[in-house]
Amino acid sequence: MAKQATSAQVGASGSTAPPPSRRERVREATLREIKAIARSHLAARGPAGVSLRAIAREMGMTAPGLYRYFGSLDELMRSLQADFFTELSGVVQAADSSLPPDDVDGRILASLRAFRAWALADRAEFALLFGPPSPHHGTPAEGEAAEAARRFAATFFALFDRLLREERFTVPPDTELSPALCHQLEAFAQHTGFRPDNVPKGALRILTSCWVRLYGMVCMEVFEHLAFATGDLEALFEAELRDALTRLGVEYRPPAAP
Amino acid sequence: MAKQATSAQVGASGSTAPPPSRRERVREATLREIKAIARSHLAARGPAGVSLRAIAREMGMTAPGLYRYFGSLDELMRSLQADFFTELSGVVQAADSSLPPDDVDGRILASLRAFRAWALADRAEFALLFGPPSPHHGTPAEGEAAEAARRFAATFFALFDRLLREERFTVPPDTELSPALCHQLEAFAQHTGFRPDNVPKGALRILTSCWVRLYGMVCMEVFEHLAFATGDLEALFEAELRDALTRLGVEYRPPAAP
DNA sequence: AAGTTTGTGTGAACAGTGTTAGCTTCGGTG
DNA sequence: CACCGAAGCTAACACTGTTCACACAAACTT
């Protein structure tokens, strides 16, 4: 049946890619299935609720078989981390490009709201990406996951860079920064691919500050701390967003009505 | 030997407290031992590395025996949470009272730095308190832990309240706050014991904003995110602290030299 | 002083877990 | 067709939380 569709119309793959053999295709499929089930368990039962045996059971196979796909449970988790990072990047970028290119303010607002929305909709996934590292269930991003994390960060930096190029906000002169802070910002720039001569350190200071506020706000909301009674802290997030973006010279607009 | 010291000089206990029977004392002792070992395992092997069996083994007993002290592993974890909250409260208060009472600015600086210092020194403990909730290894604070969390929050609110009473900073008028935000801040005030008529909502807005920045900064540092290369982000924390406290009308002073 | 209750801990057992080793079985290739 | 390697299974080891029935000793009562 499906066999006939195998070799014929793959067509559109890049010329350098050797046509994925049937073996590779089914391998890729089970690989995706494993990760899909793992994710569902993660969302339903928390990080500790992801078990190879349970995944295998649900797939109709046995746990040792999974070791043909992942070297360990940790490795599976790291692979999930990488997936989530790229998914999140995609969500943010999609929000960004859902508005006309010249509406820079609207785009950045949409992007940041998309970040929060994803975090709230996929709390366990967010926790895996931005929560505490742990020998089990997701070490600090390594290898593939680190790469995905870097690409995610770049997504945000791009937004910020637009504002910087447009000279939306006044950057504090470097003389206002303590030497230690200068040093730290320089290391940060280097680590993230900013060319330090290209972007003033004062601007980096502002970027990090805004990011911290956003990150802190979303963490608080996802991790449900500060005993904020129930539920959705949208108003507080919006207030924080407004403050942070105003500092960046972005004109705040309230979210579209539900 | 030590038997003689038993009943004699307990003396100074409050009159209403029935002298703790010998049984109660040894129970209290083993209870402390359990929690001490659990904590050491937590710090050494992470949240998932705390196991009843391992604790029991280290104590020279068997796992089921621990069920005379805790109904489950989760309960042990919650108990640890409570302990950590009160320990953290103590650390912050100690820092606060390490300076003369009239040095309000110095006191709040010391308190906030103490918060960060504790978090960095006891990362796993911090993660348990402020990290993502999880069915295992520490549900959202309940019962005793919730009480301890509330007392910790009160510690911070007290600091803030001093500044508010001294009218250090200008609070935005309530008319600047969106209705939704007003509602949320009101709920917050109620939930945390602030009397809403006693403290303007604009002030609460500032309090939460400052807390978010602090919390976000420390989370980022403890959870080691944003790929900030290595290590200690003190300069960045100090910069954030400076900004936040300036907004509160507190005169920033750099930390004492090492 | 003797008897009874209560608290504390044990051993065995159940149901899970990650992970390794050795074996089989089947798909794709020469 | 023969072969080789990938995929999967079974069995096993060493763990985990948790429950149950039982033993022992301390504490309280009569």
Image (spheres, coloured by chain):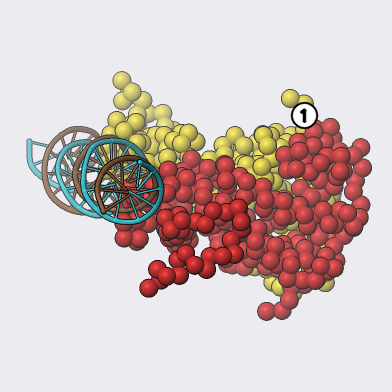
Chain colours: A yellow, B red, C brown, D cyan
Pointer 1 residue: A256
Name the subunit of mark 1: A
Q: Is residue B75 visible?
A: yes
Residue C15 x %, y %: 29, 35
Horizontal arrangement in the rendering, residue B148 relative to residue A37 (left or right)? right
Q: Is residue A218 visible?
A: no
- Quadrant (top left/top right/bottom left/bottom right) for the N terminus of chain B: bottom left
Label 1 Cα crowd, 10 Å radius (few <14 / some 14-19 / many 20+): few
At x 43%, y 47%, the residue is: B70
The amino acid sitting under disc 1 is Ala
Q: Please, which residue is most extreme toward the bottom here?
A: B258
Q: Nearer the viewer, residue B88 or B201?
A: B88
Q: Please, which residue is most extreme toward the top here?
A: A1
Q: Answer above or below: position of A228 versus D13.
A: above
Instruction: Report the number of discs.
Output: 1
At x 79%, y 50%, the residue is: B207
At x 74%, y 67%, the residue is: B97
Horizontal arrangement in the rendering, residue B186 relative to residue A45 (left or right)? right
Horizontal arrangement in the rendering, residue A177 relative to residue B81 (left or right)? right
Q: Quadrant of residue B29?
A: bottom left
- Quadrant (top left/top right/bottom left/bottom right) for the C terminus of chain B: bottom right
At x 29%, y 30%, the residue is: A60
Horizontal arrangement in the rendering, residue A71 relative to residue A40 (left or right)? left
Q: Quadrant of residue B240?
A: bottom right
Q: Answer above or below: position of A221 versus A10.
A: below
Residue B133 x %, y %: 55, 43
Q: Nearer the viewer, residue B64 or B237?
A: B64
Residue B253 x %, y %: 80, 71
Q: Answer above or below: position of A245 versus A200.
A: above
Dot 1 lies on which element?
loop
Residue A46 x %, y %: 48, 40
